[in-house]
Image (spheres, coloured by chain):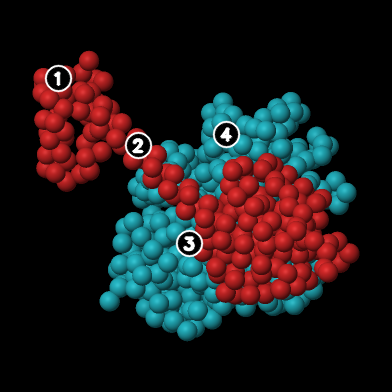
Chain colours: A cyan, B red
Amino acid sequence: MTYTLPTGYIPLTDAAPLVIARALGFDEEEGLHLDLHRAPSWSALRDYLALGRVEAAHLLAPLPIATALGLGGSAQPLEVLSVLSLNGNVIGVSPGLAQQMRRNGYRFDFKDARTAGTALLALDQPLRVGVPFPFSMHAELLFYWLEALGLPADKRPSIHTVPPPLMAEAMAKGEIDAFCVGEPWGTISVENGVGELLLPGSAIWQSAPEKVLATRHGWADRHPDLAGRLIRCLWRAARWLGNAQNMTTCAEILSRPEYLGVSPDLIDRALSGRLVISPRGETRQCDRFVAFFDGAATFPWQSQAAWIGVQLARRHGCDPVKSAQSAQAVFRADLHRLHLAQVTRDLPGASAKVEGTLTHPSALGSENGRLILPPDSFFDGRIFDPSAPVR
Amino acid sequence: MPKNLTIIIVEKDRDRALQIVDGLKASGDHTITVIAEESGLARRIAALDPDVVLIDMANPSRDALEELALASGPMERPVAMFVDRSDGALTKAAIEAGVSAYVVNGLQQDRLTPILDAAITRFHMVSRMRTELAATRRALEERKTIDRAKGILMKARGISEDEAYALLRKAAMDQGSKLAEVAEALVNTAGLLS
């Protein structure tokens, strides 16, 4: 018996786990048929999920947490069953800003967030920055980066919500001077000659949960069998995506008109981590530009939820300690572990860790002791302890 | 008598916007503004201080409206939110029709319902009209392509129009594809031969 599960996504490179699960039949392997619906915007997708038009959705990691804190336009509580991807965003600036930064001697290494930020702020210009959604890792990483660089509150850039497919257009029209967006939309700005890439999101936080698989609160507990199939089929798709040799195939599949409808060579840049950063064709290699599988990438760390909760709380005037608690409850590490028990033992034994302590890949206590976690440090060396969220 | 409501409709297509405005006018004497330009949307809406904002669900700029839900200073008015806090069935109907509404916190349900009902009806109507228009346009284009394909065959093989049509239909049946597709393939490649 195969169950059909209406599932929503936004056309982005990091929708790959859902698209690959469907296109290569990892869903059928679990007796599931993912009925994929492409959504026009994040708020629309959240509402489709809240109102039961889809049962599961590819969402920005901070979105279900914002809902749990009472922020934003929906009150339906959501929960996160898996992380779909880590990292994968780019920060880009207008060719005009890039030229001034180069003139001042900055070399666009696409790596060091401190020198990049210092070079940008040295221009001392008011900045308008486009992000896809108010509750997104894009916004969180930007705020964290600028705050850590010591930018005074009165010099903060103004943040504008611009849907990713319209980001290049907003740059071309001069409505924004910079952006933080998911691929392939940063690359498309470069292709159109309206943007140059400054940093990958991973330069700010090396292991930032980017997109998650969300369901309505209580759904996974009421339908444990379905939830298990869903988590496992996405884990299988992620394992396939963890193999670098599959990236060309993945880019071809994502490029189909029913998914992204963007040329495969543009999609491949993010998947291979080999990005073209300027309209002049300069390239930079970035390891773990986007990660789907290695180092338990699918695991919804409650400590990462807590970090997001505290950041949101600080900016929107909620209580940080309570927000950290509400945020942690959204990430169902328990269900993720439970439903993957029959397919893997490479999962963390704990549901939370101190974030930002790993500067190198490190072994971690897992059920069989073979799990290697990737680096998770913040560019400024700060750490975040979820048991003491406010310091 | 409660004061009139201020309603904003975000819609690029002028005819469509007018249809919706007409529908809403019928539900009461409201102040209705249509915004067609999508840049700086949130800022402009906030400046107009509306009671209700209606936007097509399929409009990607809807995400910009989420900023309105954040304009949360206690003294600031539109604390806008999606209607699902008030009435699930109504919201569901709205989503089916493809309309999303942001409503200022505190607007009474009995004042909102007639507006949403009217909007839902209109959205259904305009989307039906849009589908019909698209279908008609497609049918016309297909007919044109088939006519051109027939012309190419008649010239190349010196056959009658009926024979050309029969030939196309047979090819479509043999290939298991649509007549219009075979015709299109022929038209697209015939240029290579001349």
Q: Nearer the viewer, residue A252 or A10?
A: A10
Comparing labels 2 and 1, the label whose residue is closer to the camera:
2
How far is mark 2 from mark 1, CA to CA? 25 Å
The residue that disc 2 covers is B140
Question: In what element is the residue under mark 2?
Answer: helix
Badge 1 and badge 3 in a common chain: no
Vertical relation: A389 (above or below) B67: below
The residue that disc 3 covers is A8
For mark 1, name the chain: B
Question: In what element is the residue under mark 4?
Answer: helix
Q: Find residue B8 and report its horizontal and vertical position in percent.
A: 72, 53
Pointer 2 or 1: first along the chain: 2
For mark 4, name the chain: A
Pointer 3 or 4: first along the chain: 3
Question: In what element is the residue under mark 3?
Answer: strand
The tag on residue B93 is: none
How far is mark 4 from mark 1, CA to CA? 48 Å
The residue that disc 1 covers is B156
Quarter of the image holding residue A141? bottom right
**Which quadrant is home to the C terminus of chain B?**
top left
User: Left of B41 or right of it: where is A360?
Assistant: left
User: Left of A289 or right of it: where is A169?
Assistant: right
**Which quadrant is home to the N terminus of chain B?**
bottom right
Vertical relation: A348 (above or below) A87: below
Badge 3 and badge 2 in a common chain: no
